[in-house]
Image (cartoon, rainbow, N blue to C red):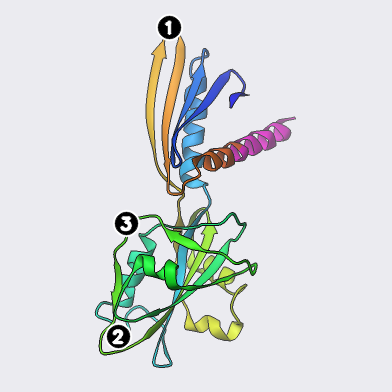
Amino acid sequence: MGNLFLACNLQCNEISSNECNLVFKSDVEGIALTYANLYRRVLLQNTPYMSVAGIKCCVDGSYIRNFFEVVPGLTGSLIDISTLLHNSVFDIENDTDCTEVIIKTSLKGKVSLSDIVKDGNFTARNGEDISMRLISKDSTLASVVSGKVIELEIFFRKGVGFLQKDINTQALKRIVEDSEINDWIVTDSQHRGVVSVSYNVANTLGRETVTLGVKSYNNNIGEVVRSCTENIIGQLSKFSDELS
């Protein structure tokens, strides 16, 4: 990346497909630290990512319209399923600009998280043919007994930070018919593409060096860093225009 910013050198050293070190160096005290803090905030808060934003559940032709209704045949509860989905990490496999997608699946017997993306049918807002994969650890999503079949639809959307239920409801309305929206249990969603950003500061002979260790959920750490850089450059350019 080289000298992207005034008086500061930035180097991106990729360790693996989902991990890198960002090294900031400057001979001017405080400059490397300032840019490193800026990157850390943007990486943690503004990296677009897919997250669960709603669930539709149907048993024997009847829709479950809140998390506290009893779901016939389900050994756990619908809120348990929602919590597990919100705490799991999924990603779209193919290169796409898709921002909203619905997965339709049938729960029979013992169903794992990976079964959803392996066997489910996908409906994307833009009509693209897409596929998803589970990144986090696989585990049982639900167990269905008594020969029941539970029809489950899961609404994923791409975003940054925390998105409220009302915002996600408006996004869902862009995919489904108005008459169907009341069958959904729409939720808040937390979008975070970066797992962690570690921090190390050193000062040798007047040269300040700050190293950020970045880990992302997906396998495209270079794209995560480029997106972050474009975001920061855009913010700095806007600020410069406002001052001039």
Q: Residue at x 47, y 67 (%)?
A: 53
Q: Quadrant of residue 71?
A: bottom left
Q: Is residue 186 visible?
A: no
Task: Name the magenta segment's main secondary structure.
Answer: helix
Indicate the amino acid at tag 3: Lys
Is 135 on the left-hand or right-hand side of 95?
A: left
The local secondary structure at tag 1 comes to loop
Circle 2 is placed at which residue position? Answer: 70
Residue 189 or residue 56, whichever sits in front:
56
Q: Earlier in the sequence, mark 2 or mark 3?
A: 2
Circle 1 is placed at which residue position? Answer: 205
Residue 164 or residue 128, whichever sits in front:
128
Circle 3 is placed at which residue position? Answer: 137
Q: CA distance from mark 2 to mark 3?
A: 28 Å
Task: Point out the stretch of residues depicted in magenta.
Answer: 230-244
Indicate the amino acid at tag 1: Leu
Mark 2 or 3, closer to the camera: 3
Residue 116 spot, x, y in % from top left: 41, 70
Q: Earlier in the sequence, mark 2 or mark 1?
A: 2
Residue 170 or residue 200, whichever sits in front:
200
Confirm whether the magenta stretch covers residue 73: no
